[in-house]
Structure formats: structure tokens, C-alpha cells
Amino acid sequence: MLPSTRKTSMKLINTIAALLCISTAAAAQTSSHSYSFLLREVDQTWCGYSKEKAFQEMAERLTPLETARVTYKSGKPSEIVYEVQAESGDWIVVDTYSIRPSGMILSRTTVFAQDGIRIVQKGNIAKGRKNPLSLVSAKNPDGTKASLRGVVYPEVDIKNDLSQFPFLTIAASMQKKGSQMLCGHLHPR
């Protein structure tokens, strides 16, 4: 290899290495990780898990009525999925809170076990104030439009701000300590 070609190759290798470092650093900044939570009814304790398998095993054993998943991007919560179901098994509500600098966007899915109706609603929560949920869709199990006549929605509170999610405190502790599992006597109300 000629000296000038070697210099050019080294510059190219250094440039590629620098670009890889920059893209790796950018990927690390935008990387995401999640924590899964379940509420142990017996002692009103939220338990968080950093490993999905451990969470699934415990959920199968306890069959909790309330669960949550918090996804972090760049060290901050970006999405919270909060699920609650009736003790009778009649319905399940899954609230997905997408966290934005201006507030949160809530997408609520309600599924009624008896007839299989799936209702999707959306709303905005800005600076602690919530807007009413708007109907996005109401479908029968076969995908046809469902009638909402006589439907009684479950009473599941809409969270106005992040402080109403007690498991976020547990997630912050898990993040700080590098814990794979942590429990705390907290309950959202």
C-alpha cells in the first residue's frame, strides 16, 4: 500500500469509527427499557420486575387484578400501560398513557367479557387537566360495529399527572439501584 493510500485508508477507518461511536451514543440516549408491575391484593403491595419472564411467572401465580408497564426512553417515562380488571372477570380496562412534554395522551380500551365488545376511546391530559374521552371505535368480536345502547362503562379513574402512579416511585428506585425486583406498599387511588 502506498503511503498516501494508507493515510487515506486510516482517515476513512477513523471516520467510520467516529461515526459508529456517535451512532452508538445516540442509540444509547434513545434506548428504551421497561419495568412491569403487579398489585398483590393480599397486602396492597405493588411489585416491579425488570425481567419480563419473572413478571409473567409471578402474574400466572397471583392472577392480579391490576398490572402496569412503564417504558423509559432516555431515562424518563415515555409510556405507561395500566390494566385493571373486574374481580368478577366481566371487563378489562387497558389505559395507555403516552407521555409528552405538553402532557399525556390517553388511549383507553375496554373489553366486556360477556359479549366481547371492545371500545376504544382517546383523550388528552394537559397540565393536570383532562379532556373527556372521545369514542374512537366500538366493535363486536367479529369486527362489526357494536351498539353502545345499555353499555355501562367501568369506573376506572383517569390519572391527571405522573404523581398518581405509585409504581413510578418503585421504578425510579429500581433504576437507581439496578434492582431486578422491588416491592412497595403503594396503591393508586
Image: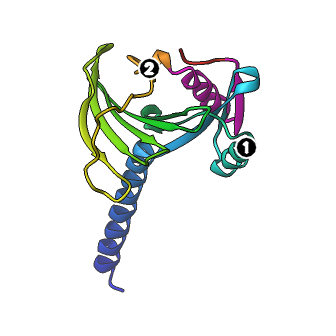
State left or right for residue 127 relative to residue 36: left
Specify whether residue 13 is painted magenta.
Answer: no
Residue at the spot x=70%, y=18% of the render?
185
Which of the two residues, 92 or 177, is positioned nearer the viewer here?
92
Q: Quadrant of residue 138?
A: top left
- Count the labels in the image: 2
State left or right for residue 33 relative to residue 41: left
Classify 10 Å Cα crowding around label 1: few (below 14), some (14-19), many (20 and above): some
Residue at the spot x=29%, y=46% of the render?
146
Which residue is identified by label 1?
A: 58
Contact (CB < 8 A) between labels 2 and 1? Answer: no
Quarter of the image with the N terminus is bottom left
Q: Which residues are magenta?
A: 165-185
SS at circle 2: loop
Q: Residue furthest front?
A: 150
At label 2, the amino acid type is: Asp
Residue 116 lies, with reference to residue 69, above or below; the image says below
Residue 165, percent from left and from top? 51, 21
Query: Can you tell which of label 2 and label 1 is closer to the viewer?
Result: 2
Residue 79, percent from left and from top? 42, 36
SS at circle 1: helix
Classify 10 Å Cα crowding around label 2: few (below 14), some (14-19), many (20 and above): few
Q: Is residue 70 visible?
A: no
Q: Quadrant of residue 180?
A: top right
Alpha carbons under labels 2 and 1: distance apart: 26 Å
Which residue is identified by label 2?
A: 157
Which of the two residues, 127 or 152, is positioned nearer the viewer here?
152
Residue at the spot x=37%, y=45% of the render?
118
Residue 27, percent from left and from top? 41, 50
Which of the two residues, 183 or 39, is positioned nearer the viewer here?
39
Which of the two residues, 139 or 115, is positioned nearer the viewer here?
115
State left or right for residue 153 relative to residue 68: left
